Image (cartoon, grey):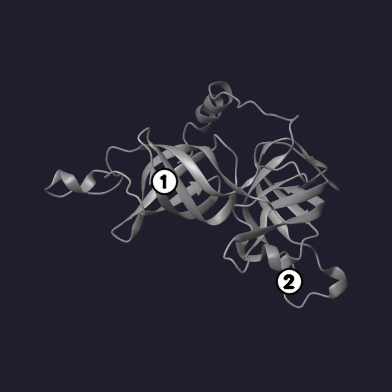
Amino acid sequence: LKYNLDVVCEYLCTQVPIPPRDFLSNPLMIIIRSFDVNKPGEEVKNLRGGVAGGSILKGVLKVNDEIEIRPGIVNKDSDGNFVCKPIRSRIIELMAEQNHLQLAVPGGLIGVGTKIDPTQTRGDRLVGHVLGHPGKLPSIYIEIEVKYYLLRRLLGVKTEGDSKAGKVSKLKKGEILMVNIGSTAAGGRILGIKDNDSAKIALTNPVCTQENDKVALSRRIDKHWRLIGWGSIIKGTTVKPVS
């Protein structure tokens, strides 16, 4: 309709507070998409490395910075334990929209062109990973303890007749949930529940995160994942990355 757009713009500029940007700490970027920019049948000399897109939470990234991506390549050893091998690379270019940047600051979506093998980045394979300077990134967790808060009733579900259907039942030990941390969705099994509304959750795949990060909990209800609550990470079991 395009009515009153000036009012909306004015409101956004004058009323919405600008979030505090942290330029000084070590850079931390959450990857929400990654892709291979090469055309099929490209000449070898023209091949370009993989590209990761996402938002910088804090810090500043510059062209030619050394970077590390965690958890990176995840495998299991003979005992069934996770082995995470972070990806090391260098930033070749930074893009925002169609503009090439020399340095990127928090806010907005940034595309980071790297020297990573494009097979590692194609088809959103790096989604949920975290990018930053080598050795300065958060730990990789395989178990987390979450202080959680459950919703009183389910969102967006029609309840017919009985009021029971829309209620969120308590978490049970051994239950499978979906845990959203940052941009990652990981499956989780509840190992135990304490009285003070904290639950210990074993994750199906390792996640790079830190304490006090927010998580969202979803439960499988009628073949759909439904949001049932949220929480924050108190502590967890980490896995040492191999170099």
Q: Secondary structure at mark 2?
A: loop
Residue 154: horizontal and vertical position, in percent?
Answer: 29, 44
Quadrant placement of the N terminus:
top left
Q: Is residue 28 left or right of residue 47?
A: left
Quadrant of res 147: top left
Residue 93: horizontal and vertical position, in percent?
Answer: 81, 51
Residues 172 and 20: in front is 172
Residues 55 and 220: in front is 220
Q: Residue furthest bottom?
A: 41
Residue 233: horizontal and vertical position, in percent?
Answer: 51, 38
Whether residue 97 is visible to the viewer of this picture, yes or no, is no
Q: Which residue occupies 65% across, 44% down?
A: 139
Q: Is residue 238 left or right of residue 48?
A: left
Q: Residue furthest front?
A: 79
Mark 1 = which residue?
Answer: 217
Q: Residues within 10 Å of mark 2 (few under 14, many from 20)?
A: few
Q: Is residue 100 above or below residue 198?
A: below
Mark 2 = which residue?
Answer: 39
Between tags 1 and 2, which lies in front?
Answer: 1
Q: Which residue occupies 67% across, 44% down?
A: 29
The CA span between labels 1 and 2 is 39 Å
Q: Is residue 99 left or right of residue 162?
A: right
Whether residue 115 is visible to the viewer of this picture, yes or no, is yes
